[in-house]
Image (spheres, rainbow, N blue to C red):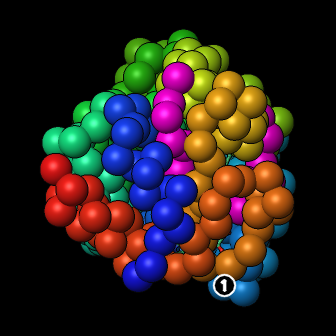
Amino acid sequence: MQFKEQFLKKLSSAKKLVFFTGAGISAESGIATFRGADGIWNKMKPEELASFNAFMKNPDLVWEWYQHRREIIHKVEPNAAHLTIAELEQYYEVTVVTQNVDNLHKRAGSSLIYELHGNIERNFCVDCHTFVNEQQFTGDEVPKCEKCGGLIRPDVVWFGENLPQDQFSAGEIAAEWSDICFVVGTSAVVYPAAYIPQSAKRAGSYLVEINIEPTELGRFVNYSIFGKAGDVLPEILKFVEDKK
Ligand code: OAD
Ligand code: ZN
């Protein structure tokens, strides 16, 4: 794989890297993306599954859908892209800012991760907000809170809900202080998450996109690399290893 000279120079002098990631980075692990030909939102209506109203209207259905996604996530493994980002910590200060809820960056070994859309492994009570993290739920019916009887929901950001402010702010600051901000496997059309790469660029970071196809962000980035994240990122690591 031949990379642009300007990018390789940046890579040689950079100290802080940010990886802003989306569903595409987990595609090679076998988790479906949201948009595109096989995207989840082509088959399901987000407003019927991924909103608080949908949950209150039909909690069992929404819970079952999240249990189904959890089952898939538990069966798959982090891929070369997740693992490479974790390995790059040997050479750089690395921050992951992810829109994914699948926990695969954590499982791959990344140590600093900001989760903009929550994490499917966590749950909390809609009434008393007690977190129910460790418990493995079985069955398809929505569980009830042991303290107050309230419904238990996944700790993910649904349509119409605010992002966790601490995660967003910390992610934005990391992006602004980064030398290179990689935008990996995301259509970058969902806001406010998509402000992260914009903030990075505005603050002077070098913006690199890795995607299998052109995106909205293409005109805005310093460098677009077309290819699978699981192919491109190991090539970048190889360059770094040879260099140091
Ligand atoms: P999308 O499904 O919108 O975009 C996935 C992107 O990954 C597309 O641009 C694909 O071209 C690209 N892609 C697919 N396979 C790839 C591969 N192997 N290597 C590199 N790129 C690949 O997913 P997101 O951008 O993550 O929100 O979607 C953003 C948000 O919309 C999600 O976090 C979710 C969804 O509604 C919430 O749940 C709140
Ligand atoms: Zn409760």
Please tell me which residue is depicted at 59% across the width and 77% down the height of the picture.
226
Please state the horizontal and vertical placement of residue 15, each as a whole percent of the image. Answer: 35, 32
Please state the quadrant of the image where ligand 1 appears. bottom right
| Observer-nearest of 122 and 180 | 180
Figure label count: 1
Identify which amino acid the numbered label 1 is placed on: Asp
Q: Does residue 213 lie above or below 147 as drawn?
A: below
Q: Is residue 211 magenta?
A: no
Quadrant housing residue 41: bottom right
Q: Is residue 61 positioned above or below 29 on the image?
A: above
The residue indicated by pointer 1 is 38
Judging depth in this view, the residue of 149 and 49 nearest the camera is 49
| Left or right: 183 in relation to 102 | right
Figure quadrant of the N terminus: bottom left
Is the residue marked by circle 1 packed among few (<14), some (14-19), or many (20+) residues within 10 Å? Answer: few
Highlighted magenta segment, given as a residue range: 177-192
- Residue 115 seen in the current view: no
Q: Position of residue 117 (x, y in %)?
A: 59, 39
The answer to whether residue 235 shows anywhere in this view is yes
Q: What element does badge 1 sit on?
A: loop
Tell me residue 235's x, y (percent). Answer: 32, 72
Q: Is residue 21 above or below residue 213?
A: above
Measuring from the top left, give residue 89's x and y in whole percent: 23, 41
Q: Residue at x 74, y 30 (%)?
A: 202
| Image position of 60 (left or right of 53) | left
Q: 231 or 22: nearer the eye?
A: 231
For the stretch drawn in magenta, what is the main secondary structure?
loop
Q: Foreground: 169 or 151?
A: 169
Q: Residue at x 82, y 60 (%)?
A: 219
